[in-house]
Image (cartoon, helix red, strand yellow):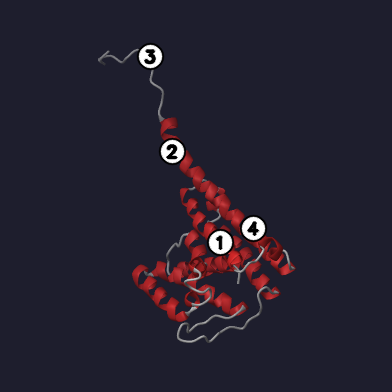
Amino acid sequence: MFLLGHSCWSYLFSRLTGRQVKVNLPAYMALLAGVFPDFDIYFKPLIQHHTYTHSLIILLPICAVLVIRFKGLGLAISAGILSHLVADSIVGTIPPLYPLSDFQLGISLGLPSPADTTFEVGALGIVLVLAYLNGDYKLVTESRRESLYLLIPMVSIVTLTLLFAGDNNVSLAAFAFSRKALTLITLGHAVLIGILGLGVFQGVRAIVDKRKQPGHASSPPSSGPPPPGSLC
């Protein structure tokens, strides 16, 4: 699955899990958790893509540590991380026992495929609805300092996409619109990045406005006569 689907399904799994355990996982962490297993792209060729970070032998202990250390917050993050493996096993396969075994597990609906496009674009639509219902949409529509954290998933999605394309000698412009299914996914990525970019703008705006406040709040000195009893 592409990063559009991974980030969106992660948001859904993480936020809904957080609701069940009564923790408010920030939107940027909910989006980022599902992208984490693809961070192996940053370390290529030291780590081959779709190996260690897509193995249950590796990820389950990491998730266990997160839950033990951060309780409900760790559980919500873990749900997002593991959603990556669920998604990949639906459209392709994962190596759940790597490095002990190269055994592949999955139903391989195809990537790209109509099924994958439905899962990815559909997830984006559900995310937009959920973000409206839980108030996360305000990170994009209002000037808030915490909106700046949306820069983290935005940069991750963009850089991982560029690195993956470069490592595999893929022309993104040609690949993105080579099939109808890919065109829809490409547009979905553009929408998501645009939304995150708008959120980052709101975060920067909030910081700039905050720095301007002291100057605007101070009142000019009075030019009238000093009050009785004051020193001249």
Q: Mark 2 points at which residue?
A: 211
The percent position of residue 125, horizontal first and vertical second, equals 63, 64
How far apart are the two marked residues, 3 and 1, measured between alpha carbons?
A: 60 Å
Mark 3 or mark 4, which is nearer the start of the sequence?
4
Q: Nearer the viewer, mark 4 or mark 3?
A: 4
The one nearer the camera, 232 or 116, is 116
Q: Distance between the residues labelled 4 and 1?
A: 11 Å
| Residue located beneath label 3 in the image | 224
Q: Is residue 16 visible?
A: no
Tell me the CA gap for discs 4 and 3: 59 Å
SS label for mark 3: loop
Tag 4: amino acid: Ala
Amino acid type indicated by mark 1 = Ile
Q: Where is residue 44 in the image (x, y as percent from the top left)?
A: 50, 69
Q: Is mark 2 on a helix, strand or loop?
A: helix
User: According to the image, label 4 marks what residue?
Assistant: 190
Quarter holding the N terminus? bottom right
Left or right: 112 in relation to 216: right
Quadrant (top left, top right, bottom left, bottom right) of the C terminus? top left
User: At 62% across and 64% down in the image, what residue appears?
Assistant: 124
Tell me where residue 66 sits by quadrant: bottom left
Image disc number at residue 87: none
Q: State the residue at coordinates (57%, 79%).
A: 89
Image position, residue 111 (x, y; %)? 65, 75
Residue nearest the viewer, comparing 98 with 140? 98
